[in-house]
Amino acid sequence: MITKGLSILTNIFIGIGLFLFIQVPILADGYWDWWGEDRTNVNLVAHWLTFLILTAFVSGIVLWIYHVNFQRYPFFKGISVKNVLATLAIAALLVIIQMVLSFVFSAHTESENNEILSLINSPLGMITLIGSNFVSPFLEEVLFRGILQNYLTIHLSMIPSLLLTNFLFALGHGYDIGNALGVFITGLGLSCLAVSTKHLGTAILGHICVNWIVTIINVVAN
């Protein structure tokens, strides 16, 4: 029992390491101070090449781990229109919940939004949009819902595995109680999508939609 517990704990820490690993592509969406860059002096070609190479490398490693060890659900093959519409509706609901929780608990929402807008409006804005709204959601869903959640369901029952998966998901994203709680609920919704539809693609699509809706709201509101 103790050996099994230590094994699970070790693999969870490996999962945390993988979470840090999938953040590597975002190195391309910020200014490289060590290269003397600022807003008026950016090597866009170097940033795009770095972004594409790192994204391909990290995606390849994560997808290999998923396909070899944990693949239970197909990505997008066989997803019905009904599932897509349900995913869009759930994504919108999750964003509303996030906004309410941020309003109630967070004292830093405005500064966080300004930081996001500053990145979007920078010369690296397109990389930021693609990285934040396509690449990160895809990699995070393969890691959390594809690898970690499937691993935990082998050793735990469904509900504890979903709760633990999304506790770790929130831990990696939460900046304060409101944000962490919002991310936890969002992750739980995405986990339920993957389980109920038996498609990892619904969780990926839902995560992409959540991020895009939040981005659009921030842009329009400011």
Image (cartoon, grey):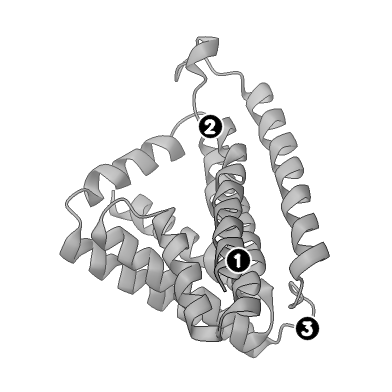
Q: Is residue 205 shown to the viewer in this render? A: no
In the rendered image, which residue does mark 3 sit on?
78
Tag 1: Cα neighbours inside 10 Å, few (<14), some, or many (≥20)?
A: few
Rounded to the nearest angstrom, the CA distance separating label 3 from label 2 is 36 Å
* Contact between labelled residues 2 and 3, with CB atoms less than 8 Å apart: no
In the rendered image, which residue does mark 2 sit on?
124
Determine the residue positioned at 58% across, 56% down: 10
- Tag 2 or tag 1, which sits nearer the N-term? 1
Determine the residue positioned at 56% across, 62% down: 6
Is the residue 18 above or below the residue 97 in the image? above
Tag 3: Cα neighbours inside 10 Å, few (<14), some, or many (≥20)?
A: few
In the rendered image, which residue does mark 1 sit on?
3
Of circles 3 and 2, the one toward us is: 3
Does dot 3 land on a helix, a strand or a loop? loop
Q: Nearer the viewer, residue 24 or 87?
A: 24
Relative image position of residue 139 (x, y in whole percent): 63, 55
- Tag 2 or tag 3, which sits nearer the N-term? 3
Determine the residue positioned at 56% across, 80% down: 156
Amino acid type of the residue tagged 1 in the rendering:
Thr
- Tag 1 or tag 3, which sits nearer the N-term? 1
